[in-house]
Image: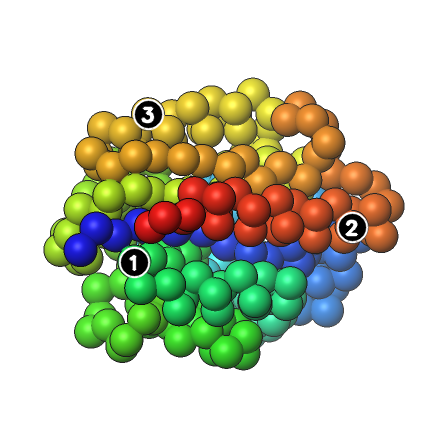
């Protein structure tokens, strides 16, 4: 039977809150609450350039976990009096980050409808830390969506969570998608991708620079076309009103735009699934 893969990004797509955590006022508060501020992480630019950037590769392509990677980076920087203090602050920060990273309830009906479709396999594909897999599974369960990690025994129509930390490669790597195809043991007839391509990340994170976002989108489409023989359709889930714009500053405006994008995504998906 022919199958369509619906591949959904997590941060900035399924979860608006995951990206809002990184906004300056939120991040400063969380650094203070977690204890990282007291250990010396008191500058937002320092956090992104000296904490996140140097640890991202290891943290997001191994099962070591963000908590341990973060604690070790604090030690490298000479922050904190001892291992217990560093690990406690790292654990509080990561736990609060994950608690903040909820899947918006507006996705619930769409996900449940997709899961019931007999020719659709839904996959949440994310570049993330190891702790995120269990978290995302819990978020899907809270919406009444059956889910399982990619590569485990499938349960019925389970939504699969493919985390780079489990796969061992980022989504920008050919090996991520080849591994995912091997785990599924099938070639999809069509692949529908909804992704923000990093555009909805905090502006202080260089990952969200418009030129990088545009390049990442083009590279992703080219990559998927080289790995799969499937028909590829992509919806760029961009919260700015134009690809080069930043997030709307007003919270209510941002949430309205976000939910309008979810409606656009639903229309995109089910238009492509007509007749499947």
Q: Secondary structure at mark 3?
A: helix
Whole-angstrom CA distance, mark 1 to mark 2, is: 32 Å
Q: Farthest residue toward the front? A: 275
What residue would you read off at disc 2?
256
Question: Which percent across, then down, holds residue 143?
Answer: 54, 75
Q: Are marks 1 and 2 in contact (CB under 8 Å)?
A: no
Q: Is residue 131 left or right of residue 252?
A: left
Taking 185 as reference, is 47 above or below it? Answer: above
How much space separates mark 2 and mark 3, taking CA atoms? 32 Å
Q: Which mark is residue 119?
A: 1
Neighbourhood count class around disc 3 (C-alpha, 10 Å): few under 14, some 14–19, many 20 upward: few
19 left or right, relative to 111: right
Q: Secondary structure at mark 2?
A: helix
User: How many marks on residues?
Assistant: 3
**Does 138 appear above or below 55?**
below
Vertical relation: 210 (above or below) 51:
above
N-terminal of the two: label 1 or label 2? 1
Q: Which mark is residue 222?
A: 3
Classify residue 131 as left or right of residue 203. Answer: left
Examine the rendering and report whether any part of residue 142 can be seen: yes
Marks 2/3 in contact by CB < 8 Å: the verdict is: no
What percent of the width, then of the height, locates residue 240?
Answer: 71, 34
Q: Nearer the viewer, mark 3 or mark 1?
A: 1
């Amino acid at each position: 039977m022919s199958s369509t893969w619906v591949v959904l990004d997590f941060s900035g797509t399924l979860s608006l809150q995951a990206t809002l955590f990184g906004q300056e006022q939120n991040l400063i508060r969380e650094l203070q609450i977690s204890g990282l501020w007291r250990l010396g992480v008191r500058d937002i630019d320092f956090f992104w350039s000296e904490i996140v950037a140097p640890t991202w590769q290891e943290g997001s392509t191994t099962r070591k976990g963000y908590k341990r990677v973060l604690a070790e980076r604090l030690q490298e920087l000479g922050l904190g009096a001892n291992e217990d203090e560093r690990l406690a602050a790292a654990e509080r920060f990561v736990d609060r980050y994950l608690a903040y990273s909820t899947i918006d309830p507006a996705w619930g009906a769409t996900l449940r409808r997709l899961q019931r479709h007999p020719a659709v396999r839904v996959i949440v594909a994310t570049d993330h830390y190891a702790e995120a897999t269990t978290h995302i599974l819990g978020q899907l369960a809270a919406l009444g969506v059956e889910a399982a990690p990619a590569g485990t025994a499938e349960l019925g129509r389970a939504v699969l969570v493919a985390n780079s930390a489990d796969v061992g490669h980022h989504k920008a790597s050919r090996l991520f998608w080849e591994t995912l195809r091997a785990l599924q043991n099938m070639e999809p007839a069509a692949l529908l991708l909804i992704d923000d391509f990093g555009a909805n990340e905090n502006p202080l994170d260089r990952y969200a620079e418009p030129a990088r976002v545009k390049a990442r989108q083009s590279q992703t489409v080219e990559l998927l076309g080289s790995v799969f023989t499937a028909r590829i359709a992509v919806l760029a889930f961009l919260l700015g009103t134009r690809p080069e714009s930043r997030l709307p500053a007003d919270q209510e405006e941002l949430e309205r735009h976000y939910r309008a994008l979810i409606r656009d995504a639903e229309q995109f998906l089910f238009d492509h699934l007509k007749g499947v």
